Amino acid sequence: MAEMIYQSPKSIEEAVNLLAASSGSVNILAGGTDLIIQMQANIDEPRVIIDVKKIAEMTQAELTEDALLLGPSMCCAALTAREDIKALFPGLVESAYLIGSSQVQGRASVGGNLCNSSPAADTVPALIALNAMCQILGPGGERTVKAEDFVTGVGRNCLAEDEFLRCIEIPRPEPNTADAYLRFIPRTEMDIAVAGAAVSVTVKDGICSSARVVIGAVAPTALLVPEAAACLIGTDLGTADLSAAAAAATAAATPITDRRGTVEFRKHIVGVLTKRAASIAFQRAKEN
Amino acid sequence: MSEAKQYKYIGQRTIRPDGFDKVTGRANYGADLSLPGMIWGKILRSPHAHALITKLDTSKAEAHPDVLAIARFEDFPTVNAAAFAEGRQDKGLVDLASNILADKKVLYHGHALVAVAARTEAAAAQALQLIEVEYEVLPPVMSIDQAISADAAILHEDMFTQGLAETPSAASNIASRMELKKGDVDAGFAQADVIVEREFSTPTVHQGYIEPHATTVRFDENGTSTIWCPTQGHFDVRASTARLLGMELGQIKVTASEIGGGFGGKTTVYLEPVALILSRKAGRPVKMVMTREEVFRASGPASASQSRIKIGAKKDGTLVAMQASLYYEAGAFKGSPMGPGCMTVFTPYDVENMWVEGFDVVVNKAKVAAYRAPGAPQAEFAAEMVMNELAERLAMDPIDFRLQNAAKEGTQTLYGPKLKAVGLVECLQAAKTSKQYQTALAEGEGRGVAAGFWFNIGGQSSVIINMNPDGTGTILEGSPDIGGSRASMQMMAAEELGIPLDRLNPIVTDTEHVAYNQTTGGSRTTFATGMAVVEACQDIVAQLKSRAAAMWNVTSEQVDWQDGSAINLAGEDKMTLAEVCAIAEKTGGQISGRGNINARGAGPSFAVHLCDVQVDRDTGKTDVVRYTAIQDAGKAIHPGYVEGQYQGGAAQGIGWALNEEYVYDQNGIMENAGFLDYRIPLASDLPSIDTIIVEVPNSFHPYGVRGVGETGIVPPLAAVGSAVSNAIGLPITALPCSPPRVLKLLQDAGQ
């Protein structure tokens, strides 16, 4: 049986040092809902596990005057229970609520979802729609990366081997701004998105003044689609505007055919989701 | 039987005797047994769907320091090359043997080739990598259309279609054809005012039991070898293993572990004989546990089907002719449920002219296993879809249309007997007055109605009840409990003996402690084993009466048994069961009752299901919004369990109709061998499934029982399919009604 080293640092500094000192296959363990399954598939591989859940700030969320500072390893169940966060970022919270099932949400985290870097990750489009920034720490210090630049390919991201995600910073939304996230699965839960769409809109005098549209599971990474947002900005999201945004999302999507859906199905569905998510976000923003 | 008969326990919702162990985790399932010195077995499986094995070299694996045994097809003495050369090969066993360890050819992706036993699980896995196999890859045959086309690759060069008028000279992938008829369908169709004819298909699906196959075995060269496994029939595991290994029944003891679902899929052997070979060679107990992926690739599944149905009716709704051609995939070896499919397809209807043909077709998929009412859901799906379309064409209510033509007592079935008293009419009437049928559909919703039939079987059951001096007792039965039968045995025995339920402990015992019991299947257990329990109780009562008579110095005839007590008809005396048991020592020793029967007269069960759906026209996604399952139980011994059977059948049928299917790539490799992408319904996918228990007693059973376990999966396919069709206004001819398929129907129709 291959050797496994498990370490659980109690502070950010300790984690940085452990990561810098480790060599070979090093994995950051948060909820483990992806990592443990991957480990079971490659049981013979020696590895070092650094469990960051014992670091208090990794699992907490702080709402400041300017932003939500989200500990990347805060479990989704804890996040979705936070009414103050839900009031500001309903789309992000609903994306976290869609991961796995109630039991899985007791372990899975937004940061883990981001770092696993699956094209179908539910929280990633929501983070991008909210202009989230990823604070990354390594031996060379800290750097900040936009959420849309974090994931670089299927299962790949911008983290160097000795770096880890220490905080997700989400700016407080402008007044009359709201977000929404929808995904499509054939069932109601315990499934992986066939397609997803996150939309954030700001409304002034009944008109959409700014928007961000992000689509998921239809390309190697979640895609920010400014062409779709442009269809919404300056409109009251009438039927034609929504259809134009849907068409833009469909056009931007470059999905694959696999057991979860064909290219044609995914492109169609991502348009439907974009339209519906935009309507929900718009309605929420008007009520804000 | 009198409707007014009042029972003390029958018909109550008692606490299930197996519940505590299950919810506390104490119940021991297939993978839970470990023995001292035990080693681990693992199986090398084919990476191809169809290929000749040109080289198989296990020498490097054998040289692995932790490997203690290897098993191959050649290790089955009754079917191997030596047996063949000596002319003593048991041909009936060859398919079974070569399914669990391939002979010269692999016939599906995941087909087992070689088994290895090693000191650790990891070492066994490593050793598999050391086995050298070379293949000559053949074209995979993955559908009925492919299999029966003129240029199809042939799976078995020695398979010549049986059941044809003339024996064919060329080998075929059609193992056999059958035909059933009554009356004259051509004459019938000539009288019809409306005829609907359509073709349908259903996908390969899996039984989806949560517990994977597992076994722990110990070979004993002198005494009795032991097998522990989750199975619906441990006596038949013993018989199959003995035949494959050339052993006597008495040399093998099989213990049925607690079972985590079967649904028909745990009625055959995969691991047990292989593990016994490994144990014999290694001299150690061997444990084998399938992964979920192995379960999907190499166990089950249920047949995919194609069918063509033609039904004719007069303007007034009278059916005049019904005709069906039914094709079933058998998987890699012959033996699909074509027969029961042909026999059940039109049984809900009393129609003079019927003609049905069936084909058993081999393809490069895992050999199919039984799945609740095997063959019936596929066939009756097609028939009921056409029935609903006919009702629509006739502008008749689908329930009225069925009532007008419903099978009832005296109806001549296509497959042989005339029906005795059955409850289809009662089910249809209950459906018509049900809350759901009285509920108006909301905008965009669709409704489907379907009937279903399954025979149910009886067969051999053996029961022993041992009484203790304090009046408690143990019911030793041999029918693995996959649906609540321990509860029903306990209830029937308590009713017969007139003692409280908790005085009796029902146990599914091993093959040594009770005589032969047929496998739990065919919805037979509460019926047949229940009758054996009643017989054993009557045996006990007779003994109790004679013991009491001895104490009172009267004859047995002068003693009556009433409500758990012996009554002296010649005097004032009375003794309770516990009091008679307490004096057993003085009256001839302890008391046991025995029931060994071959039960006849299993009552068929009919069902009617109602399904309402909402279809999202932008995504093609179907939500089931209301569902009612109505079925004849004869007599519900435990109504809660009966309702559970109805709901479980409905849930599995809804899954079959909406999302479940094996997805294969172009090489015949299943792409969704896990519960993530093989989508059985989750609790949140289903509405609360309403149930209505109809009770038309079966006169052959002392309490009127009909089996209820299988019929419930027959109607949902058409109930859901018709509801979707009704909601979108387009015909449904292929399952599953998954979102991409429904969306495509809508898009193609320009909606």
Image (cartoon, rainbow, N blue to C red):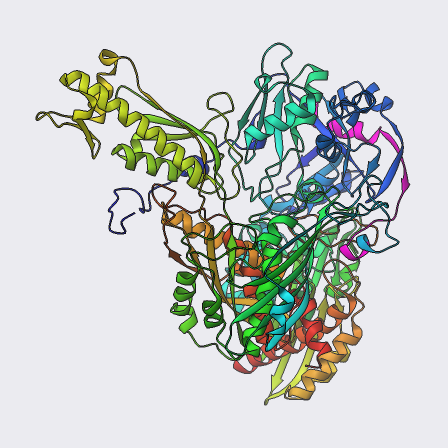
Residue A268 at x, y percent in the picture: 73, 73
Residue B195 at x, y percent in the picture: 62, 74
Residue A8 is drawn in which quadrant? Answer: top right
Which portion, as a residue range, is magenta?
B119-146
Residue B675 at x, y percent in the picture: 64, 50
Is B414 rendered above or below residue B126?
below
Residue B486 is drawn in which quadrant? Answer: top left
Residue B543 or residue B28, whichever sits in front: B543
Tell me what residue is drawn at x 39 percent, y 69 percent.
B435
Tell me what residue is drawn at x 44 percent, y 43 percent.
B601
| Residue B550 makes an appearance in the image | yes
Is A161 rendered above or below residue B351?
above
Tell me what residue is drawn at x 62 percent, y 14 percent.
B220
Residue B8 or residue A276, whichever sits in front: B8
Residue A181 or residue B380, whichever sits in front: B380
Residue B255 at x, y percent in the picture: 53, 26
Q: Judge from the rendering whether residue A152 lies leftward or rightward of residue A132; answer left or right.
A: right
Is A280 rendered above or below residue B311?
below
Residue with the most extreme left position: B572
Is B662 included in the stretch rendered in magenta?
A: no
| Residue A175 makes an appearance in the image | no
Number of labels in the image equals 0
Is A175 rendered above or below residue A27?
below
